Image (tube, helix red, strand yellow):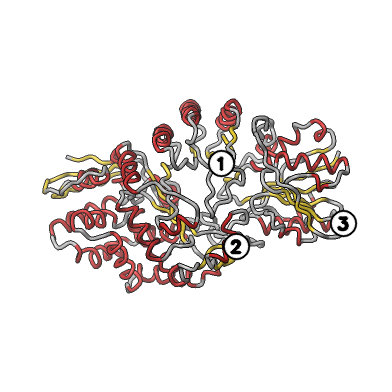
Amino acid sequence: MKNVYFIQVGFAFDKSVYLPYATGTIVAYCKAQPEIAAEYSFPEIIFRRDDIENIVNGMDNPYIAAFSTYVWNVEFNKALAKAVKEKYPECIVVFGGHSVSERMEFLAKDYIDILTLGEGEEVTANLLRMLKSGEDLSACAGIAFKDKDGSHILTAPHCPESVEDYPSPYLSGVFDSIIEKNPNLMFDTIIETNRGCPYNCAYCDWSNHKKLRLFPMEKVKGELKWLSDHNIEYCFCADANFGMFERDEEIAEYIVELNTKTGFPKVFRPCYEKNSAERVFRISKALNSRGLDKGATMAYQTLCDDALKNINRKNLTMEHFSGLMANYTQANIPTYSELILGLPGETAESFCQGLCKLLRAGQHNSISVYYCELLPNAPMCTPEYMNKYKIEPMKVQFNHIHSASGKKDNIPEYSYLVRSTSSLSRDGWVYANLFSICLQCFHSLGLLRHFAVYAYHSLGIDYYDFYSELLDFCLNDSGLVGKLFREIKRKLDGSLEGDWNHSNPVFGNVTWFFEEGLFLELLYNSAEYEKIIDKFVKPFITDSDIFENLREFQINSVKKPFESEKKFECNYDFAEYFREISSNKDFTIKEKKTSYIFKAAKKYEDWPTFAKETVWYGRRKGATLYTNNPTMIETM
């Protein structure tokens, strides 16, 4: 029997680590083929980012070492592959995964022999058959390899027509030994209910197969029950468009049923379909009835028409978006929106205005901004595309957000990000970053949100003007917020370092996104937070009575550790005012003596636990503000 080792390593977060799903699917498929199972053995998948020498020494005469390769493990895989080749020169080293493209760059390494391209189950099985029989690999579709003369051969593409017969790595026992041997680990999981994507967004490498293929419902439900039976807390759904099919509602209902019976899974995290609004709403409502999802994704990526055209994407109209936001708010379902910074055609001003368009449409709960990353199999990464839009890439160390503070891996990984384009200068990129960080900290996380909403709806002060002036204030402030913003700007200006996070042991041994770090620092240093209100906000609101009462309401709305409830009075019913606005209704604030009780769902006795559960885990649910959840508010 020839040993075939599969390697799919990832980073652990605390004691959580993903089961190696991608390689697990390939192992399950290959073991189900009798002629392959008779010739090859498949030792336990290597999934831990351990010492390379120890991994190599633990191998037993490997015939093939097959690596699943993506942005978080490219360099580690190369180092391990080199070490394997040095000790076992006859071992065939195969690289596959999202970071392997038809440009065949990996074949330039003398320790890599074969590449698999696209989906791996059938390609790998065919490769194993041909290696066994000694056939010419040129006939194996979906691979690239080195010919005897050293030239690189790219074979015909392989596009599987069906996934109906693909066995489950969960139900076939591929992961059983991993779980048994690692009782101290918490395993996160991935499942697919379908595969493929009909869209062609230029920045995305999710699927190179446009045909959508459904996994049998029996398999999907069997895997979900397996997760529940094994007390799996977190499940990521790797469908590109969950909610596209009618049966997805049945799947969501089954997940709710399992959670109700066993408590597991605790989180089911899908990426929702973009154009099935009513079905996605019903699915979100079902999942959120049990707290299974962080909320509904209202993704836009960009609101710039030129950028949308360049990335081959269409968005919902803002009117439709605004109506959906009101529906989700009335149903008490949290929503979050996502934008990508650096898309070709976007300018610094259009990006900042895009953020504010989301606020104008009612997205106050959560906005996340991601850097535009060049992924090897995305259309954006082709030389033709990059030349057309003058895309300037930068190679930066992979940013291990929410991992151990100060963690230094002896084999750093790298991302390739868009630093500038023909429409976005380097300085514009830095400014757009700072603006988005400012808006996310003070609006999405909520430190000044109620002031900004009041200023927009009752004083006619646009969000763009409010947050532009706030950013200028922060950059020039002589106190804590100025110090923090200037440090962020320094890090962004020196972007090649890739040091784009914040850390402070007060909040645990964890790194934070800049906006999260700012939020925590100002909440911890409450006097500095209140100075911003008094020095920056007060000049906007000339009615001193409204300002003082709104100041009380805003400060008390932000959750803090060590508190179970807050009681206070205002001369105005601000809760009703903001609730009506979030429901897309016009509402004029009226003087009305109101007593408030804000009740915390949980009292936190330390800052690290509060930061982790409220800011890290709870951000997209709007967990930083009492006013995001009407059930936490009592009025009299």
Residue labelled with disc 3: 148
Q: Residues within 10 Å of mark 2 (few under 14, many from 20)?
A: few
Point out the tag, 3 or 2, that comes first from the N-terminus: 3
Would you place residue 527 above or below residue 59 in this image? below
* Residue at 43%, 42% in the rendered image: 294
Residue labelled with disc 1: 238
For label 3, the SS is loop
Asked if disc 3 and disc 2 are in contact, CB closer than 8 Å, the reply is no
For label 2, the SS is helix
Distance of mark 2 from mark 1, alpha carbons? 29 Å
Amino acid type indicated by mark 1: Ala
Q: Residues within 10 Å of mark 3 (few under 14, many from 20)?
A: few
* Residue at 29%, 59% in the rendered image: 463
Q: Nearer the viewer, residue 329 or 514?
A: 329
For label 1, the SS is loop
Q: Nearer the viewer, mark 2 or mark 1?
A: 2
Amino acid type indicated by mark 3: Lys
Q: In the drawing, does residue 11 fall left or right of residue 158? A: left
Would you place residue 608 above or below residue 418 in this image? above
Asked if disc 1 and disc 3 are in contact, CB closer than 8 Å, the reply is no
Please provide percent x and percent y for residue 287. 43, 34
Point out the tag, 1 or 3, that comes first from the N-terminus: 3
* Residue at 69%, 53% in the rendered image: 50
Asked if disc 2 and disc 1 are in contact, CB closer than 8 Å, the reply is no
Point out the tag, 2 or 1, that comes first from the N-terminus: 1
Q: Nearer the viewer, mark 1 or mark 3?
A: 3
Residue labelled with disc 2: 384
